[in-house]
Image (cartoon, rainbow, N blue to C red):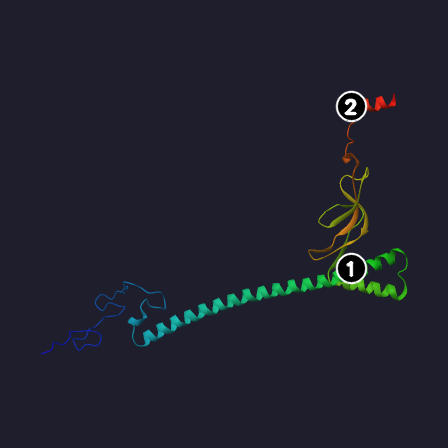
Amino acid sequence: MTDRPTGGEFGDGDPVVRDKRRIDPETGDVREPADQAPAGVPDDVSSLTGPSAQEALLTEALSERTADLQRLQAEYVNYKRRVDRDREASRELVIGTVLTELLGILDDVGRAREAGELEGAFKAVSESLERVTEKLGLVKFGEPGDAFDPRIHEALLHNYSDEVDGPTATMVMQPGYRHGERILRAARVAVSEPTEKLPEAPAESTADDEQAADKSE
């Protein structure tokens, strides 16, 4: 004779009755579960059956999908920010390249203006060109009296003067241009330094003086 199992998940033994009532029928107090799961999601969903299990599974799935959506949204925002930054950098680079090619024409316009030859239709076209380049962000710099800055100035001439307190661009031979933070061309200038910075002449040696005196005799 084969013994029947006395219990189990699918056994034919005596049924096991679990009292899951929150209210104790004898004392009327609220029972506290030993291991309380997080709100809405039990620790072990497989231990539930019926509608409670379905609700727990749906809650858990909803939490996972919500986390996935939040992660995808954050990745999309970061991606869009990078694309916008790269697009703006490319745009600035292209504009700067085009403006650099126009600097020679602007130099010709400036020389014609200084010579008094900027008249008629040529004057209208030149002024229109200057307005367009300014609208695109081209900035002209370099004025006599500016403090010399090797980052934006290129010194073509150098001299000393009593009228300056430090290295100064006293003459601008060609203006500089920048677009945003990018220097398209440095201003080419003549630089003057204070006279007290003149290098001292080397003192003649005594031997040289004696040799000169011997030659004179």
Residue at horizontal 45 percent and vertical 69 percent from the top: 68
Residue behind mark 1: 103
Percent x, y for residue 149? 73, 46
Mark 2 residue crowding within 10 angstroms, few (<14) / some (14–19) / many (20+): few
Which residue type carries mark 1?
Answer: Leu
| Label 1 crowd bin: few (<14), some (14–19), many (20+), radius 10 Å | some
Reading the chain from its start, which is encountered first: label 1 or label 2? 1
Query: Nearer the viewer's eye, disc 1 or disc 2?
Result: 2
User: Residue at image x 65%, y 64%?
Assistant: 90
**Residue 159, image x and y in percent?**
80, 41
Q: Position of residue 167 (x, y in %)?
A: 76, 42
- Specify the quadrant that holds the N terminus: bottom left
Decide which of 210, 46 is in the foreground and name it: 210
Which numbered circle lies on residue 207?
Answer: 2
- Element at label 1: helix
- Residue 44: which quarter of the image? bottom left
Q: Is residue 62 left or right of residue 151?
A: left
**Element under disc 2:** helix
What residue is drawn where x is 55% and y is 66%?
79
Vertical comparison of 75 with 214: above or below: below
Q: Is residue 20 left or right of residue 165?
A: left
Q: Position of residue 60 (x, y in %)?
A: 38, 70
Relative placement, left or right, of 210 versus 87 is: right
Nearer to us in this view, 190 or 91:
190
Residue under the image location 84 percent in, 59 percent down = 108
Compared with residue 104, is residue 189 higher up or lower down, i.e. above or below?
above
Q: CA distance from mark 1 to mark 2?
A: 58 Å
Question: Looking at the rendering, which quadrant does residue 147 occupy?
Answer: top right
